[in-house]
Amino acid sequence: ATFCKRGVNIISSIITTVREQIIHNLDQNVMKGPSVWPSPNLVQDGRDSDIIRETMSKFINNRNLRGNTALLSAITNHCSVETLKLLLENGADPRIRVKINGNTALDLAISFKRGVNFISPIITTVRQQIMH
């Protein structure tokens, strides 16, 4: 996993939360009847990245107690380009605004004077979202 400068491991915490939710869902399925999954160990061992990615995409844009998404928090914490790309590739929406001031991910990246390598993936993702 990629770390932000301040030592915040955002991706790891997202994946951990997703795994816990999937395992919880698997347990619920087992309690209610036969599970469609061959083994919960596939998820626990991290071997089923498609399931993790699909589940992560369902809540990656949820807001924390401060009203920020994972993407907005990552940018605020000066995350690496790799972390930014990983969040965007997994469904983080750069058009969501900070509740307090209305800034988007692009606004934050510009205000923190991030370079073109950082800003470009945000612009590309917004363009792709608009086109679809």
Image (tube, rainbow, N blue to C red):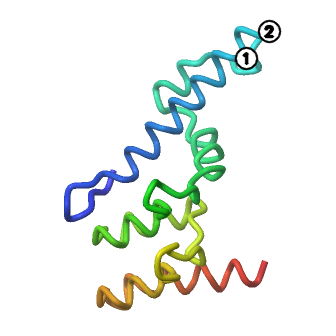
Residue at 65%, 46% in the rendered image: 54
In this view, 31 is above or below 85: above
Q: Mark 1 points at which residue?
A: 29
Could you tell me if the residues under marks 1 and 2 are in contact, i.e. CB atoms within 8 Å? Answer: yes
Give the SS element for disc 2: loop
Residue at 46%, 66% in the rendered image: 71
Q: Mark 2 points at which residue?
A: 33
Please provide percent x and percent y for residue 98.
50, 74
| Residue type marked 2 | Gly
**Quadrant in the rendering for residue 76:** bottom left
Frontmost residue, 22 versus 117: 22
Please provide percent x and percent y for residue 21.
57, 31
> Mark 1 to mark 2: distance in Å?
6 Å
**Quadrant in the rendering for residue 109:** bottom left
In this view, 87 is above or below 35: below
Please provide percent x and percent y for residue 83.
38, 63
| Residue type marked 1 | Asn
Frontmost residue, 15 versus 39: 15
Residue at 57%, 24% in the rendered image: 23
Residue at 33%, 50% in the rendered image: 1
Give the SS element for disc 1: helix
Q: Residue 10 carries which label?
A: none
